[in-house]
Amino acid sequence: MKIDHIPDALTLPLRLKLLCGLAAGKKSFAELKEITGATDGNLSIQLSKLEEWRYISSGKTYHGKRPKSTYEITQFGLQQLTEYVELLESVIR
Amino acid sequence: MDEAKTALKHFQIMKDTLAQAKTDYSGLYKLWLIYGILNTAAVLFGYLGTFLIMNSLQLLGQALILLQNLAVPILLIVYYIKIFKRDNCTANKYYLSCLALWGIPAVAMPVFTIILKGGAVLLFSPGILSNEILGKLNSFSFLLNMFLLCLCYIICAFVLNRKWIALIGLAVLFVYLGLDVFADMGSFRIEFAYRAGSYINFSLSSVFYNASIVLGYLAAGLMVKGFHKKGWGTPDED
């Protein structure tokens, strides 16, 4: 990853928060909302984009009869995030 | 220069998010498990102390009961401070609130009851300081502890997002209150002979109280530990 070629998924603070939040483990929509403090609409759009770019994947689980959307970071997403952290480190040094 | 600033800003975002996303409730469940274990020891010491006093081993019995009354609050305070010091830098304010909401009353209550008992000893002469007054103070401290257990279950319900846990806490509290109201009635006491012609009796409310503060906290600690490991506790979506 180069400084002049940072993927769109990592430039926006909210997307970065989502990826870091999911790097800590699988989360539900409500949990991500609590972690990021974003609105439902904005969160939904950013999650869709990250999923479209294959940084995260989503699934549905059932608690009783209620469906619950859960999200997790993909291997690709984790790798990109790791590379981005290394890039940031090199910039600071 | 701008790149370095952005890099630092993004590092900060990542750090804060990771701390916020870390749903580690180990402090809470460890605290409840330890409290359950301490209560188990206290209950055993209490019964053993009573048994020794009844068998003319007054000094040893009283020492055990004194140990029971002092050791639990002191150990709880020490452990709570240790947990709070470890976790107070976390960005997860929700977790910290839970820790403070239960921990501060849990630490303050025994100190409060010791002050009350000490005050009663100083205010009343031994003749007036009857078993009835001490009994009422004990009963009051039992009631506070049952409220604390109920609070523990309400916190547990919020942490795990399982509302039925709060209902169990409230049910336990109401059962105790019910038993306590009728504690002096014969049918609400358990009596057995420990020696020919000598009987010992316990009120059902005190037996229920002891069982609740032992099993209740152990169950709460194990629930938070187990449910968290299974990935439960994620809030329901509407």
Image (cartoon, coloured by chain):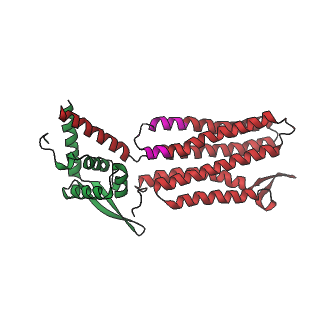
Chain colours: A green, B red
Q: Nearer the viewer, residue B5 or B64?
A: B5
On screen, residue A75 versus residue B133, left or right, reads left
- Above or below — where is B152 with respect to A58? above
Q: Position of residue B140 (x, y in %)?
A: 71, 47
Q: Residue B46's spot in the image, x, y percent?
A: 71, 44
Is B67 placed left or right of B216 in the picture?
right
Which is nearer the eye, B120 or B82?
B120
Say which residue appears at 70% left-offset and 54% top-offset. Answer: B207
Q: Is residue B85 magenta?
A: yes
Q: Residue furthest bottom?
A: A65
Image-quadrant location for residue B101: top right
Which quarter of the figure is the C terminus of chain B placed in?
Answer: bottom left
Q: Is residue A61 visible?
A: yes
Q: Is residue B31 left or right of residue B236?
A: right
Residue found 65% across the figure and 53% down from its top: B211
**Magenta segment boundaries in residue numbering:** B79-97
Where residue B77 appears, as percent x and y from the top left, is 58, 36
Residue drawn 59% across the image and 47% down it: B36
Provide residue B43's location: percent of width, then percent of height.
Answer: 67, 46
Say if the magenta span includes residue B190: no
Magenta segment main secondary structure = helix
- Up the image or down, B197 lies above or below B77; here it is below
**B79 or B178, which lies in front?**
B178
Displayed quadrant of residue B168: bottom right
User: Disc count in the image?
Assistant: 0
Q: Is residue B196 visible?
A: no
Q: Farthest residue toward the top?
A: A93
**Quarter occupied by the N terminus of chain B:** top left
